Amino acid sequence: MSRKKVGILISGRGSNMSALIEATKAPDYPAEVVGVLSNRAAAKGLEIAAAQGIATASLAQSKFPTREAFEDVMTRVLESWEVDIVCLAGFMRILTPEFTLHWAGRMINIHPSLLPLYKGLDTHARALADGASRHGCTVHFVTPGLDEGAPILAAEVPVLPGDDVDTLSARVLVEEHRIYPEALRMLAAGEVAFNS
Ligand code: GRF
């Protein structure tokens, strides 16, 4: 079995990244993580990946004259790792249409809401403010529109009386760690494909 090479983009703690790395340790998993790239040098996830012998890189966007220049270098780093699939895992930068189109069908993201509800930031607080009774997370293909690409998998959790952002986000995160490895497996195995 030839395993697809995966690059993960992070900005922070990297718990979804860790869930993906753990999943790839199964001998029959159809993908391997070949590199982790962060736009923040202090991202905790970089240490976790490096400790497992995975290549890491950090690029400070502020050092680049334009967003395009920054993304060109990201693509060069990813291509130097011969990446087949890019997983966004808490990567807190808006990507240009050019970058998303370059990786169309090969780049996926985990978003902490039941898309198309609550695109963008502060999803848990917004669900609570609305008095939503259900919330969750979605893995989707990345397209130029923010959080608009076709969904691959979603998981629902209840919003319980007394929930705050911490309790609700923790409940959703358990599901993120379950569905992200499964969605990546489906993409790597060719069970799902992007039709734009
Ligand atoms: C997750 O909630 C993910 O859904 C969102 O950003 C958060 C990243 O957390 N896109 P982690 O870095 O994977 O722990």
Image: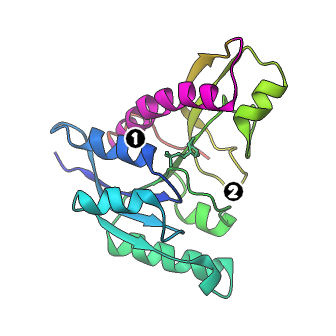
Q: Is residue 6 left or right of residue 176?
A: left
Residue shown at 69% from the left, 56% from the top: 144
Residue at mark 1 to residue at mark 2: CA–CA distance? 20 Å
Please report whichever mark, 1 or 2, sits nearer to the chain's N-terminal start.
2
Disc on res. 144: 2
Q: Residue 92: in sight, yes or no? A: yes
Circle 1 packing at 10 Å, graded few (<14), some (14-19), many (20+), is: many
Q: Nearer the viewer, residue 152 or 175?
A: 175
Circle 2 packing at 10 Å, graded few (<14), some (14-19), many (20+), is: some
The question of residue 180 being in magenta is answered with yes
The question of residue 42 being in magenta is answered with no
Residue 138: image quadrant is top right
Instruction: List x then y, in percent, for residue 151.
Output: 59, 35
Mark 2: amino acid: Pro
Q: Which quarter is ligand 1 in? A: top right
Instruction: List x then y, in percent, for residue 75.
Output: 48, 73
Q: Nearer the viewer, residue 16 or 31?
A: 16
Q: Which residue is mark 1?
A: 184
Q: Which residues are magenta?
A: 161-188
For the residues bearing labels 1 and 2, Cβ distance under 8 angstroms: no
Mark 1: amino acid: Leu
